[in-house]
Image (cartoon, helix red, strand yellow):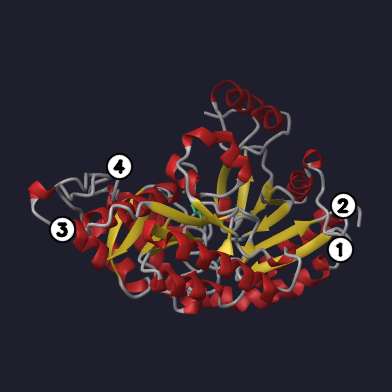
Amino acid sequence: MSFTYEEMLEKNRRYLWNPFTQMKEYLADHPPIIERADGVKLFDVEGRSYYDGNASVWLNPHGHNRRELNQAITEQLEKVAHSTLLGSANVPALLLAERLVQITPEGLEKVFYSDSGATAVEVAIKMAYLYWKHRGQPQRNQFISMTNAYHGDTVGAVSIGGIDLFHSAFDRMLFPTEKVPYPYSYRYLGSEEDCRSACLQELEQCLAEKGETIAAVVVEPLVQGAAGLIMMPPGYLKEVEKLCRKYQTLLIADEVATGFGRTGKMFACEHEDVKPDLLCLGKKLTGGYLPVAATLATDEIYSAFYDDHETAKTFFHGHSYTGNQLGCAVALASLDLYEKENRVDHVRKMTPHVADLLQSTAKLTHVGEVRQCGLMIGIELVQDKTKKSLYPYKAAIGAKVCKRARELGMITRPLGHVITFLPPLVATREELTEMVHILHQAIQEVTQS
Ligand SMILES: *Cc1c(COP(=O)(O)O)cnc(C)c1O
């Protein structure tokens, strides 16, 4: 069966409600309707092609329609698509758990599956909460998280999140948390070093005052993603870990965005030799194919739940599709590709190339800051460079730049006034060059600089 673009858009209008989308705006915008993809390109039903400039919202590491990944799914499909992990196990879920324990930072020994980044975070905060309860310290039931943090969209994940726009939308539904400032050096009145020490001081003060009630500190290691790709000053993450140890609370690392090579190491925590107590993984875990996420825990946490039936210390949490075989099988094949194609090395090699290309973008009149960590890039647009003044919300400057980039052949998304660029990790030097040129041109034209 084949449909025209107009017929498909009409179905979108009638039946589909898109996420994070003002439907009124979207439906008027001639949105692309994707039909197929190959490598780093997406093709729409009208025959246009686009670079996948944000890896389909930060997912895709190896490119689309990879034979090895497709094959892993069809081979598993011939055996079984899904059976439950409640009271049984399955082969790919076991093999993947073993692989994840091997490749993640030392000390993380147990894997709990779920199906999205948000649920991986929900699992981590529930584990931390119950860990202290089972250890006889139920007063440790609060969380410290960072301003502008993003941990997903379920109610618990939004509660520990810090993006005001989302928070204020759901205010009364959320549980209270302690917020400490995230070191956003560009918007700090002072040096990066001052910013770093001021933020650490606030974290320490919060722990000194309330440490006895804190179950865990939750961070996005190295890069705050949805906040606008904001990089931690070097050494910051290590200091956060030290403070968690000093005040004997847990450290939860949300590597849903940074995990699996995005920053130039397999996990961002490795840059500073940080060993979290709980680690949340999602997004690239399945090669960008299927919704499997994981929360890794230390044996110390696992053993707090390990007891006789009558103690009721069971971890009462699970999802229908937990440990899905197709998802775990493709995740295993994805990890094979990381090894076979030295994916993370490639990211390290491409990082300076992209940095060079972006130098002229950074000089544009309305580019306030270009931030990069591996292949995780944010370009912050400003109305006035010296004053660092923001464009008004209604100018929708980010959306306009991304729209122009799309016309020029690349899809990516804005985060307010920050343009995101997170290409598939597999992108070649030439592909990255073309993508950055599109971004540069779109910014130049839209901001008239
Ligand atoms: C995307 C993201 C999440 C949420 O993942 P979903 O799969 O969209 O639920 C959580 N944390 C971080 C840091 C993310 O970037």
Q: Mark 2 sits on what residue? A: 447
Label disc, if present, on residue 319 of the rendered structure: 4
Residue at (68, 73) in percent of width and height: 194
Disc 2 residue crowd, few under 14, some 14–19, many 20+, Cα 10 Å: some
Residue at (32, 53) in percent of width and height: 139
Which amino acid type is marked by label 1?
A: Leu
Question: Cα distance, mark 4 to mark 3?
Answer: 20 Å
Question: Cα distance, mark 2 to mark 4?
Answer: 46 Å
Q: Is residue 342 shown above or below 411? A: below
Counting from the top left corner in percent of width and height, residue 338 is at: 44, 70
Would you say the residues marked 2 and 4 are in contact, meaning their CB atoms lie under 8 Å apart? Answer: no
Quadrant for the C terminus in the image: bottom right
Element at label 3? loop
Q: Please tell me which of labels 4 and 1 falls first in the chain.
A: 4
Residue at (21, 60) in percent of width and height: 304
Would you say the residues marked 4 and 1 are in contact, meaning their CB atoms lie under 8 Å apart? Answer: no
Residue at (61, 61) in percent of width and height: 423
Which amino acid type is marked by label 3?
A: Tyr
In the image: residue 365, left or right of residue 129: right
Question: Cα distance, mark 1 to mark 2?
Answer: 9 Å
Question: Cα distance, mark 1 to mark 3?
Answer: 58 Å
Q: Please tell me which of labels 2 and 4 falls first in the chain.
A: 4
Would you say the residues marked 1 and 2 are in contact, meaning their CB atoms lie under 8 Å apart? Answer: yes
Rendering quarter of residue 29 = top right
Q: Mark 3 sits on what residue? A: 306
Q: Please tell me which of labels 4 and 3 falls first in the chain.
A: 3
Q: Is residue 233 shown above or below 93? A: below
Element at label 2? helix
Label disc, if present, on residue 427 of the rendered structure: none
